[in-house]
Image (cartoon, rainbow, N blue to C red):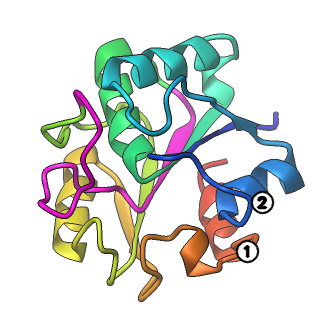
Amino acid sequence: MNPIVFILPGLNNSGPQHWQTHWEQQYGFIRIHQQDWDTPYAEDWIDTIDAAVKQHPLEQVILVGHSLACCTIVYWARKFNRTIKGALLVGPSDVDAPSYPPGTSGFMPMPLYRLPFPSITVASSNDQYVSIDRAQLFAEAWGSRLVNIGNCGHINSASNLGLWPAGMTLLQQLY
């Protein structure tokens, strides 16, 4: 049985050159569209995830979050306690860090709850929004396996990953 893969972009959405957009277009994954990409409220994002996910057999659902969507997934799991197939958490932004951009509401403090499903956290050693030490702390708290992909910035459009085959290999480990 094939998984149902949801793409969850972070703050400001994922543009045309982002690996999430490439995956959506290439593999037919489903993007969860949030009401407000630029000044989001956490409860809105959490409820939007749940509205999309609960329409499908949970045992088939895999969430692919980037940046702010990573902590949103953790808050969603805590609020709804739904057991899904798994989650790929890429470039989790540290919402508690001074470098985190302003404009978001309700995402702090950084959630440190154990996820009730398998997950892989992917981090870069030179991400301006999370240190590798903090990414390790998050992964441990979430019960997630940490994968450090080296110097790839925020693992976003600026990282020029294209279709990002190495990321797809990680995602397939959750299948």
Amino acid residing under circle 1: Gly
Q: Are marks 2 and 1 in contact (CB under 8 Å)?
A: yes
- Label disc, if present, on residue 162 of the rendered structure: 1
- The residue nearer to you, when weighing 128 against 163, is 128
Boundaries of the magenta span: 84-106
Residue marked by disc 2: 22
| Image position of 50 (left or right of 148) | right
**Residue 55 falls inside the magenta stretch:** no
Residue 21 in percent (x, y) is at 73, 54
Residue 30 in percent (x, y) is at 74, 35
Mark 1 element type = loop
Residue 154 in percent (x, y) is at 43, 70
Say which quarter of the image contains residue 34: top right
Amino acid residing under circle 2: His
Q: Which residue lies furthest to the bottom in this view?
A: 151
The structure residue drawn at horizontal position 60% and vertical position 20%, both measured from the top left corner, is 53
| Image position of 67 (left or right of 160) | left
- Compared to residue 16, the image places residue 77 above or below, namely above
N-term-proximal mark, 2 vs 1: 2
